[in-house]
Image (tube, rainbow, N blue to C red):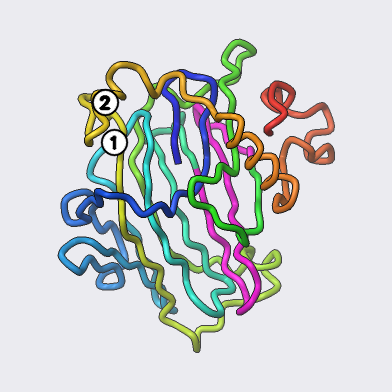
């Protein structure tokens, strides 16, 4: 995912890109819950989260990030993962927090994952979009959130956020609205993470080999190029299954203001 400081848009896309530099999970993340169900191994190059009937597990980044680009390669729960949710998101703290969400909703074997996305600004969310995850996502944008501060819509540019991820049971709603329950005979369910890479600025400093380009403002005006805009429209045309901007039943008084400002919503 990549996100501008105060520029045109926030790009929400999953990057499973193989990168030259991979961070060390021992140095960059803390296990936050799940007892022994979360593990860091292979010299800090791989992290795994597991879920069984007693508990899930999770982690968070040691550092906060204000804007930039973050890459993470995820291997989602294999096989029958119905009822499970692998959440990967950035969030600040407090009642008026900012947050950028990806939630991967599990499936029956052979069915595509659904990725549920949301954006919170100043504590307000309700900006859900969902996609079938059955396409190659390396460097393919699936969502943008345009800066619409000029019409009173807050933009996530001032509150530094940490990276969080968790694997947990949500069979009351996750798969077909809760109709398909978790098959605990398949437990433990495990997701894997590797090749974490960050080109971003924390509240105090810029990090990674791209720090010089970040510090001179390169991230502040980042936009999608023409090719990426075409890829975004292709994904939204063929794989989007829910868009809050077109849900007139949910917003009978009119769609949210930001929806009227960008054809990419």
- Split into 4 quadrants, where in the image is the N terminus? top left
Q: Residue furthest front?
A: 227
Is-magenta flag for residue 118? yes
Give residue 30's quadrant in the image.
Answer: bottom left
Q: Is residue 41 left or right of residue 167?
A: left
The percent position of residue 147, horizontal first and vertical second, equals 56, 21
Tell me if label 2 and label 1 are in contact, CB under 8 Å: yes
Give residue 91's quadrant in the image.
Answer: top left
**Up-down relation of residue 116 to residue 56 (above or below):** above
**Residue behind mark 1:** 64
Q: Who's the residue at 47% across and 56% down the image?
A: 87
The percent position of residue 195, horizontal first and vertical second, equals 31, 55
Q: Nearer the viewer, residue 171 or 48?
A: 48
User: Looking at the rendered structure, which numbered label has been put on residue 203?
Assistant: 2
Q: Nearer the viewer, residue 107 or 227?
A: 227
The percent position of residue 110, horizontal first and vertical second, equals 63, 77
Disc 1 packing (10 Å; few <14; some 14–19; many ≥20): many
Q: Give the structural element (helix, strand or loop) at label 2.
A: loop
Q: Give the structural element (helix, strand or loop) at label 1.
A: loop
Is-magenta flag for residue 60? no
Which residues fall within the magenta stretch? 101-127
Q: Residue furthest bottom?
A: 185
Q: Who's the residue at 22% across and 65% down the image?
A: 40
- Disc 2 to disc 1, how far (Cα)? 7 Å
């Amino acid at each position: 995912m990549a996100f501008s400081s105060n520029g045109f848009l926030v790009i929400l896309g999953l990057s499973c890109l193989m990168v030259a530099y991979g961070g060390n999970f021992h140095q960059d993340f803390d296990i936050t819950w799940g007892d022994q169900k979360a593990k860091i191994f292979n010299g800090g190059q791989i992290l795994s989260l597991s879920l069984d009937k007693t508990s899930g597990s999770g982690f968070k980044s040691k550092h906060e990030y204000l804007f930039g680009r973050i890459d993470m390669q995820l291997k989602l729960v294999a096989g029958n993962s119905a009822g499970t949710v692998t959440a990967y998101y950035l969030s600040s703290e407090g009642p008026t927090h900012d947050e950028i969400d990806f939630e991967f909703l599990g499936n029956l074997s052979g069915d595509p994952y659904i990725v549920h996305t949301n954006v919170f600004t100043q504590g307000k969310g309700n900006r859900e979009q969902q996609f079938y995850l059955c396409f190659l996502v390396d460097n393919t944008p699936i969502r943008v959130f345009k800066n619409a501060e000029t019409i009173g819509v807050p933009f996530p540019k001032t509150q530094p956020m940490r990276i969080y991820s968790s694997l947990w049971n949500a069979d009351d709603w996750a798969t077909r609205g809760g109709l398909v329950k978790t098959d605990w005979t398949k437990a433990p369910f495990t997701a894997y993470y590797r090749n974490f890479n960050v080109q971003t600025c924390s509240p105090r400093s810029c990090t990674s080999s791209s720090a010089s380009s970040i510090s001179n403002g390169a991230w502040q005006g980042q936009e999608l190029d023409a090719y990426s805009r075409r890829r975004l429209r292709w994904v939204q045309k063929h794989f989007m299954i829910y868009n809050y901007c077109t849900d007139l039943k949910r917003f009978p008084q009119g769609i949210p203001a930001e929806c009227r400002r960008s054809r990419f919503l």
